[in-house]
């Protein structure tokens, strides 16, 4: 939902998070500085490709001309970001997906027209760079017929919300109970898997988590 990503909404989310304790957030100026730094290093004549691997699959929020199935090498999809806002809260903390180092990842590449790069990356940065938990990266994105240069957001391993190691059992527990103003982690997982399935992408990691969550629900039903 595009209307969710504006300065007033971002400030509201940050204020809400800080009411419950310390929360690191970038200022609008800091966030814009990282965006302008990224944009200063790319050629805008042919537009900008953006690689999506989680909620961008079904809710990109920014305007794009076309999307294509895509693969990114060197990074893998993993629940490694603690969520205390959005799809988590202090009472019901959750986890979010991020791109962590190693392996490869299938997703979607969205093309932003040259004349829309300024406005649409502003939306993207308000969506992805509230706290600095991600780093904007120049990457090589493999499309069905060629490789293109583009943008994606990978985990900032020095960020306090980064989780280096977490068991499958703890991952499932947090996803089963995590919930915030933007919805539940359970819905986030199921939406991601459903849209990957539509693309005929079988993510063994996500399917294993989904199966273990079903087993957890079954045990709860018969308890």
Image: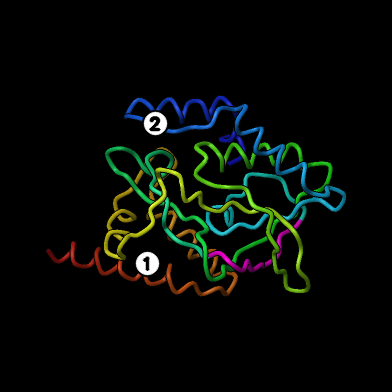
Q: Quadrant where the C terminus lies?
A: bottom left
Q: Is residue 141 above or below residue 177?
A: below
> What secondary structure predominates along the stretch shown in magenta?
strand
Identify the magenta region: 66-75
Q: Quadrant of residue 52?
A: bottom right
Residue 131: x and y, percent?
49, 37
Q: Of the two numbered discs 2 and 1 on the same chain, state the one appearing first in sequence.
A: 2
Horizontal side of residue 117 vs 69, given as left or right: right
User: In what element is the residue under mark 2?
Assistant: helix
Looking at the image, residue 219 sits to the left or right of residue 38; the answer is left
Which residue is denoted by mark 1 in the rendering? 210
Query: Is residue 179 in the magenta section?
Result: no
Residue 24, how many percent across, how many down?
44, 33
Q: Is residue 136 left or right of residue 155?
A: right
Badge 2 is on which residue? 17
Q: Nearer the viewer, residue 116 or 137?
A: 137
Residue pushed farthest left?
A: 223
Task: Name the residue at 30% across, 53% down.
Answer: 174
Circle 1 Cα neighbour tier, 10 Å, few/some/many (<14 / 14–19 / ≥20)? some
Q: Secondary structure at mark 1?
A: helix
């Amino acid at each position: 939902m595009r209307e969710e990503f504006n300065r007033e909404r971002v400030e509201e989310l940050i204020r809400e998070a800080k009411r419950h304790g310390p929360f690191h957030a970038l200022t609008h100026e800091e966030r814009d500085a990282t965006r302008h730094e990224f944009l200063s290093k790319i050629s805008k004549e042919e537009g900008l490709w953006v690689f999506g691997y989680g909620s961008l699959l079904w809710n990109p929020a920014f305007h794009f001309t076309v999307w294509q199935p895509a693969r990114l090498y060197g990074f893998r999809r993993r629940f490694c970001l603690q969520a205390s806002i959005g799809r988590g809260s202090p009472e019901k903390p959750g986890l979010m997906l991020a791109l962590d180092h190693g392996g490869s990842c299938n997703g979607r590449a969205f093309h932003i027209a040259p004349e829309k790069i300024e406005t649409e990356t502003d939306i993207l940065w308000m969506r992805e760079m509230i706290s600095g938990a991600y780093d904007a990266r120049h990457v090589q994105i493999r499309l069905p017929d060629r490789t293109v240069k583009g943008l994606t957001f990978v985990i900032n391993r020095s960020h306090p919300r980064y989780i280096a190691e977490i068991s499958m059992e703890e991952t499932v527990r947090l996803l089963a109970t995590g919930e915030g103003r933007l919805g539940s982690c359970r819905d986030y997982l199921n939406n991601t898997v459903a849209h990957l399935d539509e693309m005929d992408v079988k993510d063994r990691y996500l399917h294993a988590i989904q199966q273990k969550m079903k087993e957890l629900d079954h045990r709860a039903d018969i308890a």
